[in-house]
Amino acid sequence: MIVQETLRWGPATSLAVPQTCLRDDNYNGYCIPKGAIILGNVWAMTRDETVYKNPEVDPDRFLDSSTPPSPVFAIGWGHRRCPGTNFAEASLFLTIASILTTFNIGLAQDENGKDIFPSGKMNSAMLLTPQNFVFKLTPRSTSYEELLLRNP
């Protein structure tokens, strides 16, 4: 559920993969000619208040079965949805679960021992990425640490 909400709240890209209009179409009074390139606004779709009541992050959002499934607009939607979407989502879930099982993730400290809080700011480019930040990653147990040292 938290992975779905993270994908919705912080999509990797603000614009979806370009699509081509296959025939003349009319949308809300706008004529979209055949052959026009359509760029879906992922950021706007993931914050559509008619679909998601509160656009801010809500880790419990997908616990409610009436909430639409995980929004993966960045890699297509409808008939042009990427066939690897399910594999990508499963891989992402397993990666995150493995990291959270193996490590404690915490705040880094400065030279005076004070916690360093990430700014939460993003780099605005074709792909949205967080601005550089530091954090503390420690193995949850000595057995995990030994395993990591044996298999770097």
Image (cartoon, rainbow, N blue to C red):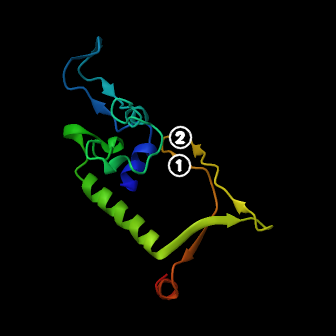
For residue 67, side relative to residue 128 (left or right): left
Q: Is disc 2 surrounded by few (<14), some (14 to 19) or many (20+) residues within 10 Å?
A: few
For image coordinates 20% across by 26% down, the residue present is 22
User: Vertical placement of 74 versus 103: above or below?
Assistant: above
Q: How dense is the environment of label 1, judged by Cα within 10 Å: few (below 14), some, or many (20 and up)?
A: some
Residue 10 placed where, x, y %?
46, 45
Quarter of the image for the N terminus: give it.
Answer: bottom left
Tell me residue 76's x, y (percent).
29, 41
The residue drawn where x is 35% and y is 62% is 93
Residue at the farthest top position: 29
In the figure, is residue 115 to the left or right of 28? right
Q: Nearer the viewer, residue 40 or 116?
A: 116
Which amino acid, mark 1? Thr
When asked about the image quadrant of residue 17, the answer is: top left
Q: Which mark is residue 125?
A: 2
- Label 1: element kind: strand
User: What residue is shown at x 30% (from left), y 23% (from top)?
Assistant: 36
Residue under label 1: 129
User: Is 118 on the left-hand or right-hand side of 61?
Assistant: right
Task: State which quadrant residue 47 falls in.
Answer: top left
Q: Quadrant of residue 67?
A: top left
For the residues bearing labels 2 and 1, Cβ distance under 8 angstroms: yes
Q: Is residue 134 left or right of residue 47?
A: right
Q: Position of residue 137 (x, y in %)?
A: 57, 71
Percent x, y of residue 41: 39, 32
Disc 2 residue type (three-letter): Ala
- In front of the other: label 2 or label 1? 1
Work out how far the residue at label 2 is from the one at label 1, CA to CA, in angstroms: 8 Å
The secondary element bearing badge 2 is classed as loop
